[in-house]
Image (spheres, rainbow, N blue to C red):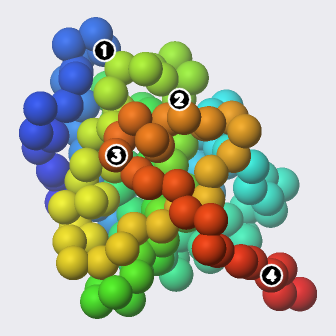
Amino acid sequence: MKVISPNNARRDAIGPLEFREGLDGLTPSRILTLYRRAPLLRPVKDAERIWEMFENSSLVLTAWHDSHLVGIARVLSDGVINSYLCDLAVEPDVQGLGVGKALIKQVVERCTGTELLLRDSDISTGYYARLGFKQVSNAWFQVCR
């Protein structure tokens, strides 16, 4: 287990947070519960598929408060040019208290030298712009089935 000390994370309203890198403490059930509550639009009925997503990730960062998972960030990266923030989910009870911002800050630190890309949804419109992300119009995607 790697415990990460948050730098300047706003923790005063909910008490101290513990940040971890890796899958330590995670289970498919914990992830699915957070994704449902956040809400994050992922295949929340397929625990095996969710766990496989996490095992194949380049970086997983989690935020814990009193042994409860309150936030998660998941990244795919080549470590040279491109990084993709696949997921950012924060418990509704602590949204707006800096948990997501602290997770993003740590993602950016670990992805130094790459371009960090993400897909936004209507749920989080405007959030990433406030954190310094720039919107791009030259992106395409295709669902591979």
Residue occupied by mark 3: 132
Q: Nearer the viewer, mark 3 or mark 1?
A: 3
How far apart are labels 3 and 1 at the CA level? 25 Å
How far apart are labels 2 and 3 at the CA level? 22 Å
Marks 3 and 1, the one that precedes in the sequence: 1
Q: Give the residue at x 45% y 48%.
A: 72
Q: Nearer the viewer, mark 2 or mark 3?
A: 3
Asked if disc 2 and disc 3 are in contact, CB closer than 8 Å, the reply is: no
How far apart are labels 3 and 4 at the CA level? 27 Å
Q: Amino acid at mark 3?
A: Gly
Marks 1 and 4, the one that precedes in the sequence: 1
Element type where label 1 sits in the image = loop
Marks 3 and 4, the one that precedes in the sequence: 3
Residue occupied by mark 1: 14
Q: Quadrant of the C terminus?
A: bottom right
Asked if disc 1 and disc 4 are in contact, CB closer than 8 Å, the reply is: no
